[in-house]
Image (cartoon, rainbow, N blue to C red):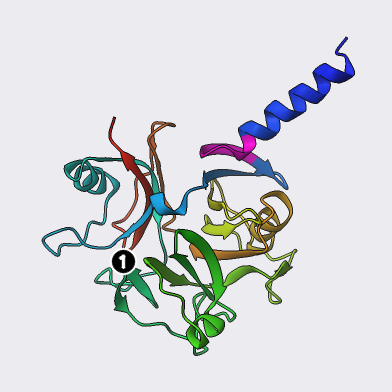
């Protein structure tokens, strides 16, 4: 029989494992997800094209690009919606350079299901910011990608989410918790917006979270030996560390 001290130690070990950098699988409301956590936002990067201006589009090409720079790609996923030529829909900033401007108007599709938002890394700090607030007072983002809808806004779910919706798709998104850690999430099956949003709010303690994309959602995780196949992507976000 476990003593109270052993039970406490066991709980602490579980908590430590849950907050460490890396990717892990979890189940929420009966659905399977993979969550990749990043504590140091300075290790995140955002890509669209390579050094020659060609769209990267694939995880294996991104691995090669990163390796040529003396780094290792730990994980990556598609970083938002894109046009047919793979250009970003909405704001896209890489290495402080804006390649596409922010879009704040209403319109059709998930992107314009306002409020939408921006994932930004500025001053080595990650944030998810509602797009109109961002446009009013934009931080100096090293990287930034816009998508929509927001999943969680200041601790509240998007007002148009229906917990009984029949619209279920493979989805991915990103949230930033109260300690400033980034959580990149991809569903391993078909899920509702509402259910994915509650994962960020109730499990990952993220008061602000952003939907990135749907059917084309893909994840690459070196530690898990996983690299999802699928159509060529537009923007890609991931973590890079110095090669050992």
Judge by depth and name the residue closer to the eye, 91 or 220: 91
Q: Which residue is mark 1?
A: 94
Q: Residue at x 29, y 65 (%)?
A: 95
Q: Position of residue 23 (x, y in %)?
A: 51, 39
Camera-nearest residue between 107 and 197: 197
Q: Residue furthest front?
A: 123
The quarter in which the N terminus is drawn is top right
Q: Is residue 2 above or below residue 239?
A: above
Figure check: 76 above or below 13: below
Looking at the picture, how far across and down is residue 98, in whole percent? 31, 76
Please say if 74 is above or below 85. Answer: above
Q: Residue 21: within the magenta?
A: yes
The residue at the point 41 percent across, 82 percent down is: 102
| Circle 1 crowding by C-alpha within 10 Å: few under 14, some 14–19, many from 20 | some
> What are the residue bounds of the magenta stretch?
18-26
As drawn, is 13 to the left or to the right of 5?
left
- Res. 84 image quadrant: bottom left
Give the secondary structure at mark 1: strand
Instruction: Write the residue at 73% across / 48% down.
Output: 29
């Amino acid at each position: 029989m476990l003593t109270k001290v052993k039970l406490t130690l066991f709980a602490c070990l579980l908590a430590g494992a849950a907050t460490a950098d890396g990717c892990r699988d979890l189940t929420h409301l009966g659905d399977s997800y993979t969550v990749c956590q990043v504590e140091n936002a300075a290790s995140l990067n955002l890509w669209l094209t390579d050094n020659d201006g060609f769209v990267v589009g694939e995880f294996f090409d991104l691995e090669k690009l990163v390796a040529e720079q003396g780094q290792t790609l730990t994980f990556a996923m598609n970083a938002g919606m894109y046009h047919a030529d793979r250009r970003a829909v909405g704001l896209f900033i890489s290495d402080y350079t804006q390649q596409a401007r922010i879009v704040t108007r209403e319109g059709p599709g998930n992107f314009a299901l306002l409020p939408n938002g921006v994932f930004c890394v500025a001053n080595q700090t990650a944030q998810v910011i509602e797009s109109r607030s961002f446009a009013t007072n934009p931080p100096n983002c090293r990287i930034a990608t816009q998508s929509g809808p927001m999943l969680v806004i200041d601790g509240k779910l998007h007002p148009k989410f229906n917990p009984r919706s029949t619209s279920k798709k493979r989805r991915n998104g990103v949230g930033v918790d109260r300690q400033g850690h980034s959580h990149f999430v991809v569903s391993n099956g078909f899920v509702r917006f509402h259910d994915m949003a509650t994962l960020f709010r109730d499990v990952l303690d993220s008061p602000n979270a952003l939907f990135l994309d749907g059917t084309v959602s893909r994840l690459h995780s070196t530690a898990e030996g996983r690299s999802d196949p699928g159509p060529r992507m537009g923007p890609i976000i991931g973590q890079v560390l110095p090669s050992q």
